[in-house]
Amino acid sequence: MKQSQLFTKTQKNAPKDEVSLNAQLLIRAGFVDKLSAGIYTLLPLGLRVIKKIENIIREEINSIGGQEIFMPSLHPKENWEITNRWKSLDEDMYKTKDSSDKEFVLAPTHEEVIIPLAKKFINSYKDLPFSAYQFQNKFRKEKRAKSGILRGREFIMKDLYSFHLTEEDLNDYYEKVDKAYLRIFERAGIKEKTYKTFASGGTFSKYSHEYQTLTQAGEDIIYICEKCHTAVNKEIIADVENKCPECGEKLSKTEKAVEVGNIFKNKDKYTLPFKVTAKNENSEDILLLTGCYGIGLQRLMGTIVEVFNDERGIIWPETVAPFKVHLISLSQNEQAQEIYDNLVKSGIEVLYDDREISAGEKFADSDLIGIPYRIVISKKSLENGGVEIKKRNEKESRIIKIEDIAKEIK
Ligand code: ATP
Ligand code: MG
């Protein structure tokens, strides 16, 4: 894509009321626009990142048998009365009415739709287990919407739900989701900083697990076990007697972290009120067990920004970067155009800065936007034998021949 065609622009300053680093950088670099507290538009660059993240998650969830669906955001009150959450989540939900006073909620989560949906199709053990997921907006009255895109009032979640006849089967699938999550966070570049964290399990299982990424921007405190790379959320540290539930090591080191995902065994919490049963092999009706598993997409994107940045801007991991190459032409548009065409032909995603502005401005924008490879073509680079290439996290550039560019990048 040519940068002259991008309708958005970079900005010197973020809005004054934007206190979080992720949103400051993302707004200045032109990835997101703030509409209101906790409500952001994804601009072309930002949507490209979200789509990369979405595809990583999709591939990994498909690989454990998840079937992608898309449920509505607007839910009738009845479904939420069945679980009693019309009342219990009242303070967190955006509720509305239609012209005949029928009440609805803008969904903060989707158990109230997926559970009765499963009831329509699942009759016997032969239909089980199964899991379904979606990428869909969630709406929540977040009181502290001060963490930029880490805590939106409207945000996209990957929410996966699994259905099982036995607890053993639920436990098996739970472990598979854990492995898939680790692959997702590895591919997103944050594996080392992300800890599988024991957290409160509510009434139906001893623990749930959160995936907590170390950052000062996080709102959670976790106790980390360096021995086995797991952690315990401060909320339950007393319950585990300050010991790692995995290896027994004494826990004392605390860190700030953000929850990028979680996995939860709900057991029959939702299938009971909706009476979702299936026949087992002896033709007995068995109440189904469920698990639910979430990842916030903007939360993950914002976390990556919090982890990978320097004083000049964002440093995207290649796997989620909006483009792989930032091609910068300093008054050499003819050769640059040729390089651009060739890279695009070989399937490399390029942002080509063809604008009529100073070299300094182009470099500053490039550092701010944070694309992994920067290639500069100028009179000087041509005299030196080609183009300058530099990774965003490297200090010095080097000269390579024009014909070697594609090879160098692939
Ligand atoms: P938190 O404790 O941070 O409020 P939560 O316990 O409400 O999170 P869930 O309702 O289980 O989270 O949602 C699943 C995932 O969705 C979380 O792990 C997180 O990645 C993401 N998420 C939750 N709330 C938000 C939000 N307001 N903005 C962006 N992502 C969110
Ligand atoms: Mg919450």
Image: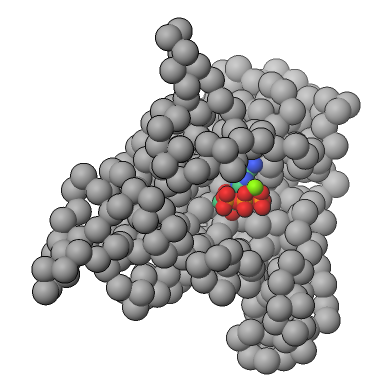
* In the foreground, 221 or 300: 221
- In the figure, is residue 204 to the left or right of 61? right
Residue 405 visible in the picture = no
- In the figure, is residue 202 to the left or right of 178? right
* In the foreground, 13 or 90: 90
Q: Residue furthest right?
A: 16
- In the figure, is residue 177 to the left or right of 318? left
Question: Which residue is pictured at 65% across the width and 57% down the height?
Answer: 259
Q: How many marks?
A: 0
Q: Residue furthest top?
A: 99
- In the figure, is residue 111 to the left or right of 245? left
- Seen in the picture, residue 252 relative to 24 is either above or below; the reply is below
* In the foreground, 80 or 307: 80
Residue 124 visible in the picture = yes
Question: Which residue is pictured at 83% across the width and 78% down the height?
Answer: 253
Q: Residue furthest bottom?
A: 248
Residue 327 at x, y = what percent? 60, 37
- Seen in the picture, residue 133 relative to 358 is either above or below; the reply is below
- Seen in the picture, residue 105 relative to 291 is either above or below; the reply is above
Question: Which residue is pictured at 74% across the width and 28% down the height?
Answer: 37
Question: Which residue is pictured at 82% across the width and 56% down the height?
Answer: 216
Residue 290 at x, y = what percent? 38, 61
Residue 193 at x, y = what percent? 68, 67
Image color mode: one colour
